[in-house]
Image: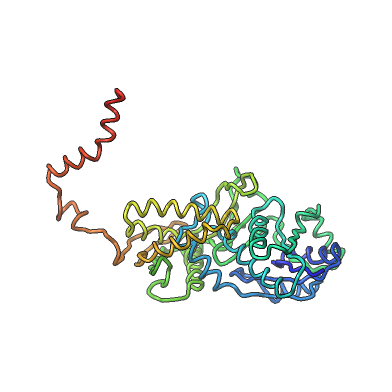
């Protein structure tokens, strides 16, 4: 039997290599997908081989993640429940897709991943695999074995497996779009998260910084006048925004699997870019377009979070996003300082804003007759309804 395992290099998936070999008498091939996490991929490969992998693949998918996934998270203002920028959720279908590609190449009998039965990621991995490789068997060791974290560490030591024992306090998932933090005191929603949980959003710079972000077709293309590829732009803004302590999210999240959880994220570039994009949309869209777009954004965010990347509606929403974002071009100036983010101004060739119309000091004013007529017609539905109801 041949099994291809999505391999992060952490405790669960490292133990999974040996467990899969022993349980299924299988050859295990590991796949690590680089989506911007700060890992030593050479050491991850070495760990995989020592744990028992027969072959290892490291796949660089950073640009693909930025251009084909994150770009839509920006165009569609991807904030699950209005808060979470979908960093972990967004990367899972891409990682699973790369694992499936290797499984097909290697003619594997099964695909495996390290998700537990309590997490959302099992849904995202399983559904992606089912969409792309319907006939392959899916194995999730952590859903099968009854080992606790301590049991896994003991198992690894007994088998002589070198493991990356993460902080005993926190479980971390990281990619270009964000850093997810779970475990320890975070499980108690009444307790403040301590500073040791954070890495990306430490207060380094003491002075405020003003940053200009340029957009074209709804996607950021330049910072402070310097054009750059999207993945590099995101990396730069993670540093710039994070160095001012901006980008922390803490909230109670409704999981796919049926219960609420407290979640903590560091997402400086994600939040800053989405807030800037939303500001441009408000500047450019008509009121009707803006209200419709908010509904589309919410639908897309729910689909991505819930693991439904291959739902046909998601593809339709991408087409809508491409069409509507043709007009989202311009510049947004922002200020970051001491954990805060503030938009200072914006400009766009597609903005219908007119100072002549909006200014109270000069320009156009409707006549008293025009204003009275508008108000009468505008409120007619409401006023007539009140009268006939005797209110």
Q: In which quarter of the image is residue 167?
A: bottom right
The quadrant the C terminus occupies is top left
In this picture, residue 275 sits left or right of residue 156? left
Give percent across and percent down for residue 84.
53, 54
Q: Is residue 128 left or right of residue 361?
A: right
Residue 118 location, x and y as percent?
A: 69, 50
Q: Above or below — where is 232 with respect to 348?
A: below
Quarter of the image with the N terminus is bottom right
Q: Residue at x 19, y 42 (%)?
A: 374
Residue that extends furthest to the front in the rendered view of this protein = 135
When the figure is inspected, residue 5 is found, relative to residue 299, above or below; the finding is below
The residue closer to the viewer here, 329 or 338, is 329
Q: Residue at x 72, y 54 (%)?
A: 116
Q: Which residue is drawn at 32% across and 52% down?
A: 287
Residue 63 on image: x %, y %: 54, 73
Q: Quadrant of residue 311?
A: bottom right
Near-viewer residue (136 or 365): 136
Q: Is residue 380 above or below residue 335?
A: above
Is residue 61 rendered to the left or right of residue 350?
right
Q: Where is residue 343 in the image (x, y as percent from the top left)?
A: 37, 59
Front residue (pair 155, 244): 155
- Rendered image coloring scheme: rainbow
């Amino acid at each position: 039997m041949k099994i291809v395992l999505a391999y992060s290099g952490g405790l669960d998936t490292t133990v999974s290599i040996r467990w899969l070999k022993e349980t299924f008498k299988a050859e295990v091939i590991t796949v690590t997908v680089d989506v911007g996490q700060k890992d030593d991929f050479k050491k991850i490969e070495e760990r995989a081989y020592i744990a028992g992998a027969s072959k290892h693949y490291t796949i660089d998918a950073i640009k693909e993640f930025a251009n084909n996934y994150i770009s839509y998270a920006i165009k569609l203002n991807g904030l699950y429940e209005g808060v979470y920028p979908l960093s972990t959720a967004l990367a899972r279908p891409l990682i699973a897709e790369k694992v499936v590609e290797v499984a097909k190449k290697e003619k594997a009998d099964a695909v495996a991943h390290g998700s537990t039965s309590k997490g959302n990621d099992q849904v995202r991995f399983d559904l992606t695999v089912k969409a792309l490789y319907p006939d392959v068997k899916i194995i999730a060791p952590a859903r099968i074995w009854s080992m606790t974290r301590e049991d896994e560490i003991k198992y690894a030591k007994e088998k002589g497996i070198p493991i990356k024992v993460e902080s005993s306090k926190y479980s971390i998932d990281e990619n270009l779009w964000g850093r997810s933090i779970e475990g320890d005191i975070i499980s108690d929603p009444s307790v403040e998260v301590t500073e040791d949980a954070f890495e990306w959003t430490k207060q380094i710079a003491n002075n405020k910084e003003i940053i200009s972000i340029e957009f074209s077709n709804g996607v950021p293309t330049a910072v402070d006048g310097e054009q750059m590829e999207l993945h590099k732009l995101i990396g730069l803004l993670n540093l710039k925004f994070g160095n001012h302590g901006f980008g922390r999210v803490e909230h109670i999240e409704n999981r796919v699997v049926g219960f609420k959880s407290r979640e903590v994220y560091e997402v400086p570039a994600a939040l800053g870019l989405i807030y800037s994009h939303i500001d441009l949309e408000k500047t450019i869209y008509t009121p009707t377009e803006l209200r419709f777009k908010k509904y589309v954004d919410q639908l897309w965010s729910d689909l991505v979070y819930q693991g439904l990347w291959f739902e046909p509606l998601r593809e339709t929403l991408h087409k809508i996003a491409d069409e509507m974002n043709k007009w989202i071009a311009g510049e947004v100036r922002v200020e970051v300082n001491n954990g805060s983010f503030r938009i200072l101004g914006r400009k766009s060739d597609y903005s219908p804003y007119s100072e002549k119309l909006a200014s109270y000091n000069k320009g156009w004013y409707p006549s008293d007759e025009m204003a009275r007529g508008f108000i009468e017609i505008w409120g007619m539905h409401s006023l007539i309804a009140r009268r006939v109801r005797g209110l």
